[in-house]
Image (tube, rainbow, N blue to C red):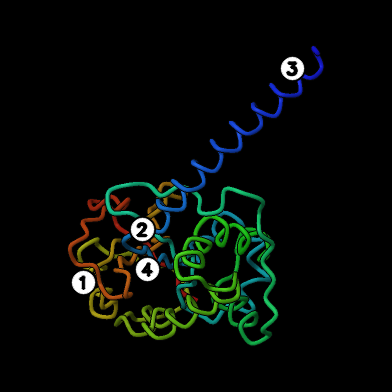
C-alpha cells in the first residue's frame, strides 16, 4: 500500500514538473519569436589581433585585407536584452556547402580560437531564433542568409570605400570624423564600439541596427562604447 501511494505521488510530481517545463518552453517560444529588430555586428579584425597575435597570424592569411569581418547577426528586442535562443541541448553547426564554408572562413572567422566553436556559439545564442521564427531547416540556412546580407549591403567594403588613405600601419581619427567617413558607406543607423589596449583606443565593432525586413531601423537609439574625447585608432594592412 505504501509503495502504491509512493508511486502515485512520484507520477504526480513528474507530471507537475513536465507541465512547468512546457509552460516555460511556451513562454520562451513566444519571447524569441517576438523579437523586433536585428543588430548586425561587424568587427575590425586587426583590432582583435592586438590581444591574440599568435592565433591571428595564420587566420589573417585567409582574411582579405582591410575588411571588417562578421561578428554576428543578433535577433534583439528594442530596449531589452534577449536571452540565449537555444536553451536546450547545444546544436552542432555543420556546414556542408563548401562555398559557404570558404566564405565564412574568409569573412566570419574566429580570430581568437577555432572557427567551429565560434560558429556554434553564434548559432545557439542568436541564429536559432531566426531559424525557429521563420521555420528554416537549421544552421546552414542562417549562416547562408547572413553572408548574403553582408555581401548585399557591402559591409565587406566599408573600409575600402570609406575614403581612408589606406597604408599599412595605425592611423588615428577624431570620433566625429570617423563617424562621418563611415556614414558615407554604412547606409543604415549604426554605432561604433571601441576597446582600449596599451592606453590607446581602437575601433573594434560597428553595430548596425535593422528592422525585420533588414532595412535601417532609424528609430532605434543605440549607444557607443567609444570615448568621444579620445582619438580612435584603426590598423590597416
Query: Gap between marks 1 and 4, in whole Å?
Result: 16 Å
Q: Earlier in the sequence, mark 3 or mark 4?
A: 3
- Give SS at disc 2: loop
Looking at the image, which residue is at 52% across and 46% down? 25
Which is in the foreground here, disc 2 or disc 3?
Answer: 3
Query: Gap between marks 4 and 2, in whole Å?
Result: 38 Å
Q: Kindly identify which numbered label has been placed on residue 73.
A: none
- Taking the image as shown, residue 31 lies to the left or right of residue 21, namely left
Give x and y (percent) for residue 153.
Answer: 36, 82
Query: Gap between marks 3 and 4, in whole Å?
Result: 76 Å
Query: Gap between marks 1 and 2, in whole Å?
Result: 30 Å
- Give SS at disc 3: helix
Give residue 150's quadrant in the image.
Answer: bottom left
Q: Kindly identify which numbered label has been placed on residue 35.
A: 2
- Give SS at disc 1: helix
Q: Earlier in the sequence, mark 4 or mark 2?
A: 2
Looking at the image, which residue is at 56% across and 39% down? 21
In front of the other: 103 or 6: 6
Q: Earlier in the sequence, mark 3 or mark 1?
A: 3
Looking at the image, which residue is at 45% across and 73% down? 68
In front of the other: 128 or 113: 128
Q: Earlier in the sequence, mark 2 or mark 3?
A: 3
Q: Kindly identify which numbered label has been placed on residue 171.
A: 4
Question: Which residue matches tag 1?
Answer: 180
Question: Which residue matches tag 3?
Answer: 5
Amino acid at each position: 500500500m505504501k509503495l502504491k501511494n509512493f508511486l502515485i505521488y512520484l507520477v504526480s510530481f513528474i507530471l507537475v514538473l513536465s507541465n512547468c517545463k512546457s509552460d516555460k518552453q511556451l513562454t520562451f517560444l513566444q519571447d524569441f519569436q517576438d523579437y523586433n529588430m536585428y543588430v548586425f555586428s561587424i568587427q575590425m579584425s586587426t583590432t582583435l589581433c592586438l590581444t591574440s597575435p599568435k592565433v591571428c597570424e595564420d587566420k589573417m592569411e585567409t582574411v582579405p585585407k582591410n575588411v571588417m569581418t562578421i561578428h554576428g547577426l543578433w535577433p534583439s528586442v528594442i530596449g531589452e536584452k534577449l536571452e540565449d535562443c537555444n536553451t536546450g541541448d547545444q546544436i552542432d553547426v555543420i556546414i556542408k556547402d563548401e562555398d559557404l564554408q570558404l566564405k565564412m572562413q574568409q569573412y566570419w572567422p574566429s580570430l581568437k580560437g577555432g572557427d567551429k566553436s565560434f560558429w556554434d556559439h553564434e548559432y545557439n545564442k542568436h541564429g536559432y531564433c531566426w531559424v525557429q521564427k521563420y521555420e528554416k531547416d537549421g544552421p546552414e540556412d542562417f549562416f547562408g542568409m547572413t553572408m548574403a546580407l553582408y555581401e548585399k549591403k557591402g559591409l565587406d567594403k566599408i573600409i575600402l570605400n570609406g575614403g581612408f588613405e589606406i597604408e599599412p600601419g595605425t592611423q588615428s581619427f577624431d570620433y566625429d570624423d570617423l563617424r562621418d567617413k563611415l556614414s558615407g558607406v554604412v547606409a543604415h543607423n549604426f554605432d561604433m564600439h571601441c576597446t582600449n589596449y596599451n592606453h590607446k583606443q581602437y575601433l573594434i565593432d560597428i553595430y548596425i541596427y535593422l528592422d525585420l525586413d533588414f532595412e535601417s531601423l532609424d528609430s532605434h537609439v543605440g549607444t557607443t562604447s567609444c570615448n568621444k574625447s579620445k582619438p580612435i585608432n584603426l590598423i590597416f594592412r
